[in-house]
Image (tube, rainbow, N blue to C red):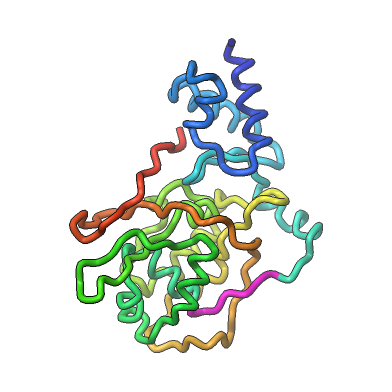
Amino acid sequence: MNTAEAKRVLETALICASAPLPLAEMKALFNHEIGADTLRRLLDELVNDWQDRGVELVALASGWRFQSRPELRVYLDRLHPEKPPKYSRAAMETLAIVAYRQPVTRGDIEDIRGVTVSSQIVKQLEDRGWIDAIGYREAPGRPALYATTRQFLDDLGLASLDQLPPIDGAESAARSFEALAQAPELPDLLEGAQASLPLEALQEAAAPAGTSEAPEGALSAEVPPAPPPQDPLPTVGTDPAAVEAAPSTVNDKPA
């Protein structure tokens, strides 16, 4: 198979895929006769081919996918003007803390927020596929350790946790998410694809300690029904002795 034909096959597979396509599955398209380096070169060519179109090819934590460009989202939203589900400020605070302090226990989150974190908040984020338990801390009661998932990064439009902007503390998480929301490279999605993470809601997630768990002032986020659970991402700097089970790393990365 020549390069032009291989690129056509790869492009078709990416367009027809219902989820991000990892390199391992791309290799299977060609019966593993094409290596990772060649695939990345073909992906780079496809990125350039679609550069001036309304759809772009991007690399996420789970693989590569085509999606609409951010500036076109306002038009696509008119096709489905549905009222989005709401996420409370407490949920956004909890998510921001897990994202920047992972792995953390509910107790860690409560220490940072200064209030009790309800199990309903944690379950809501788990059901959405944004956080998951990756193990247990060797402490009295062996509390579960929570980390973000590949779904979390996919919905943010990121390929790895390293792409989250650095912060000085959990209180700065909201400002960091706000910067992400304003970044021109942050993608929106095609109709029918999974919605992006509600960055506008996360803008106020890292408020000073002592805020209430009440849903007062809940923030809207356009999201579809919760997807099937996915493996959590590995966390950086985790002590292997403190975690019983850790997920495998993401090997596929953008060229």
Height in image: 78 above or below 53? Answer: below
Quadrant in which the C terminus is drawn: top left
Q: Residue furthest top?
A: 2
Name the image quarter holding residue 99.
bottom left
Farthest residue in the front direction? Answer: 141
35 versus 196 height, above or below: above
Q: Quadrant of residue 107?
A: bottom left
Q: Position of residue 136 (x, y in %)?
A: 28, 65
The residue shown at (51%, 54%) is 151
209 horizontally vs 25: left or right: left
Instruction: Indicate left or right for 166 with 152 as reference.
Output: left
- Magenta span includes 74: no
- Residue 219 x, y percent position in the rendering: 59, 76
Q: Which residues are magenta?
A: 84-90
Identified at 35% across, 81% down, the residue is: 110
The vertical placement of 94 against 15, above or below, is below
Q: Residue at x 52, y 71 (%)?
A: 124
Label tally = 0
Residue 194 relative to residue 34: left or right: right
Q: Nearer the viewer, residue 100 or 125?
A: 125
Quadrant holding the N terminus = top right
As drawn, 211 above or below 191: below
Q: Position of residue 109 (x, y in %)?
A: 35, 76
